[in-house]
Image (tube, rainbow, N blue to C red):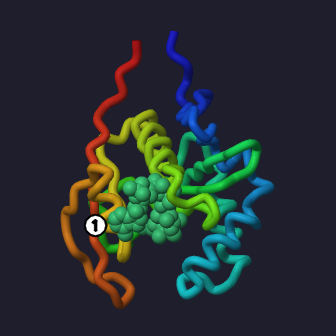
Amino acid sequence: MSVPLKERHITVLNTDNMIEIKYLYEYETWIPVIAQWYYAEWPKIYTGIAQVISRLEERTNRSSLPLGLVAVENGEVVGAVALKDHEIEALTQHTPWLASLIVKKENRGQGIGKILIEGLLDKARQLGFLKIFLYTDTMAGYYAALGWTEIQKYYYKQQEVTIFEKKIGPEVYT
Ligand SMILES: CC(C)(COP(=O)(O)OP(=O)(O)OC[C@H]1O[C@@H](n2cnc3c(N)ncnc32)[C@H](O)[C@@H]1OP(=O)(O)O)[C@@H](O)C(=O)NCCC(=O)NCCS
């Protein structure tokens, strides 16, 4: 018997460093910590820490967008990512988007970013999406190496960004 989508857990587990992908919903108390990481990384795009916190609070959904996921190691949140309807306002034809990928500075380079992306693709697939989009100004090489396809360059917020897509296909249940 299949389990209703909203009841299912995300179960990407890396047995080397025991990273679990969980809903932000389950780790709401970590929102102020995650907000600090975002604000330190992208100070210009937020008006202040309160705005980052409120954006994160909007992502505490499990079966609707915006939806936040976190990477958890030994009970501690070490990274986060979001699935959003829209990211670049003018590109309404593209949906959904992977957004706000971040790994705590001390934990970078251990594959956690990749695991978060896999968890998000899994969730997007569960929700029935066949494709997913993202944009980046500095990490195009990273996403290309992970199999994302560049679809266009775009001028956004005074800079050139690269837009990527990834086909994720229908999920097959047995
Ligand atoms: C991007 C980020 C989430 C990656 O997380 P991570 O856990 O360190 O990533 P992973 O461990 O999965 O991958 C690291 C690999 O990507 C490579 N990489 C890093 N930046 C890269 C770039 N700009 N282009 C190509 N490869 C890159 C690293 O060299 C490393 O390769 P290796 O595994 O062969 O050593 C993390 O660096 C981060 O939080 N950055 C700040 C926020 C940010 O830029 N987010 C992305 C917004 S689009």
Q: Which residue is mark 1?
A: 163
In front of the other: 87 or 43: 43
What percent of the width, then of the height, locates residue 122?
44, 37
Residue 105 position, x and y percent, is: 61, 67
Residue 88 as seen in the image, left or right of residue 119: left
Q: Residue at x 63, y 78 (%)?
A: 39
Examine the rendering and report whether any part of residue 82 can be seen: no
Q: Is residue 136 left or right of residue 41?
A: left
At horizontal 62% and vertical 28% (from top left) the residue drawn is 7
Position of residue 149 in the picture relative to residue 8 (left or right): left
Residue at (19%, 63%) from the top-left corner?
151
Q: What amino acid does circle 1 point to?
A: Ile
Tell me where residue 125 appears, x and y as whole percent: 40, 37
> Between 107 and 37, which is closer to the camera in this rendering?
107
What element does badge 1 sit on? strand
40 w.r.t. 62: above or below? below
Picture quadrant of ligand 1? bottom left
Q: Of 3 and 41, which appears nearest the observer?
A: 41
Crowdedness near tag 1: few (<14), some (14–19) or many (≥20) residues, C-alpha within 10 Å: some
Q: Quadrant of the C terminus?
A: top left
Q: Residue furthest top?
A: 1
Q: Is residue 164 above or below residue 162?
A: above
Q: Is residue 58 above or below residue 63?
A: below
Residue closest to the far right: 29
In the displayed image of the protein, which residue is found farthest to the left? Answer: 151
Quarter of image, res 88: bottom left
Please count the marks in the image.
1
Q: Is mark 1 within 8 Å of ligand 1?
A: no
In the image, residue 106 lies at what x, y percent? Answer: 64, 64
Res 155 visible: yes
